[in-house]
């Protein structure tokens, strides 16, 4: 789906997508992002991700049919419902725990690239008409989320 030359693997940002009744992010005891019914997305950016990758991932996320319809079935996309997404950058999604007990993050993007693609991801969602709330990139955050379902989807090529 998305091509990369990194170890011959396909490049696809890592996302954890959770359907929530509400979610909020706090930094230093201050709420910086908050949504009601919608999606809570943890976004991991890899070394080989690009703006093209972001565009394709955003399209996939917006079409993902995990929102409930009138009968409680997962038949609707976020675009057909609330259009609210809380996005938090999380490089730890790229943790490699295959060797030893200390996770390695060598496949995570460097901070400058990750920040740029995170901002591009958010702006791409906004351009599509989504109300986006965010955390603060590179900052310690406290997150509260009331999961709905629970519905949790991992979007990754691994």
Image: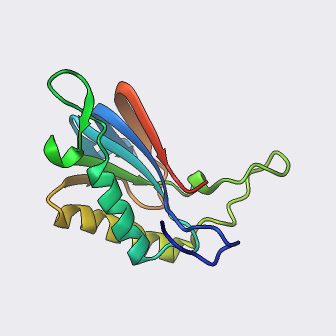
Q: At 20% across and 62% down in the image, what residue appears?
A: 126
The x and y percentages for residue 29 are 37, 41
- Horizontally, residue 63 falls left or right of residue 13, namely left
- Horizontally, residue 2 falls left or right of residue 103, namely left
Q: Is residue 102 among what the camera can see? A: yes
Count of residue discs: 0
Q: At 36% across and 28% down in the image, what residue appears?
A: 147
- Horizontally, residue 94 falls left or right of residue 136, namely right
Residue 67 vs 27, above or below: the answer is above
Residue 75 vs 139, above or below: the answer is above
Residue 41 vs 122, above or below: the answer is above
Q: Nearer the viewer, residue 22 or 1?
A: 1
The x and y percentages for residue 100 are 85, 48
Residue at the right extreme, as displayed: 100
- Horizontally, residue 110 falls left or right of residue 118, namely right
The x and y percentages for residue 149 are 35, 24
Q: Is residue 83 among what the camera can see? A: no
Which of the 4 image quarters holds residue 10?
bottom right
The x and y percentages for residue 104 are 73, 58
Q: How is the image coloured?
A: rainbow
Residue at the top extreme, as displayed: 71
Q: At 64% across and 68% down in the image, what residue appears?
A: 9
Q: At 27% across and 48% down in the image, what residue appears?
A: 85
């Amino acid at each position: 789906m998305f091509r990369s030359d990194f170890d011959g693997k396909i490049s696809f940002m890592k996302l954890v997508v959770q359907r929530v009744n509400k979610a909020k992010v706090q930094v230093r005891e201050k709420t910086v992002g908050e949504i009601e019914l919608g999606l809570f997305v943890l976004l991991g950016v890899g070394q080989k991700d690009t703006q093209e990758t972001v565009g394709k991932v955003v399209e996939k996320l917006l079409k993902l049919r995990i929102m409930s319809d009138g009968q409680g079935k997962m038949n609707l996309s976020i675009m057909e419902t609330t259009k609210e997404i809380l996005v938090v950058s999380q490089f730890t999604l790229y943790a490699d725990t295959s060797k030893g007990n200390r996770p390695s993050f060598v496949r995570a993007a460097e901070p400058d690239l990750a920040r740029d693609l995170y901002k591009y991801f958010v702006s791409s969602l906004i351009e599509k008409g989504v109300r986006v709330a965010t955390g603060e990139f590179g900052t310690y955050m406290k997150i509260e989320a009331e999961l709905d379902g629970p519905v949790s989807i991992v979007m990754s090529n691994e």
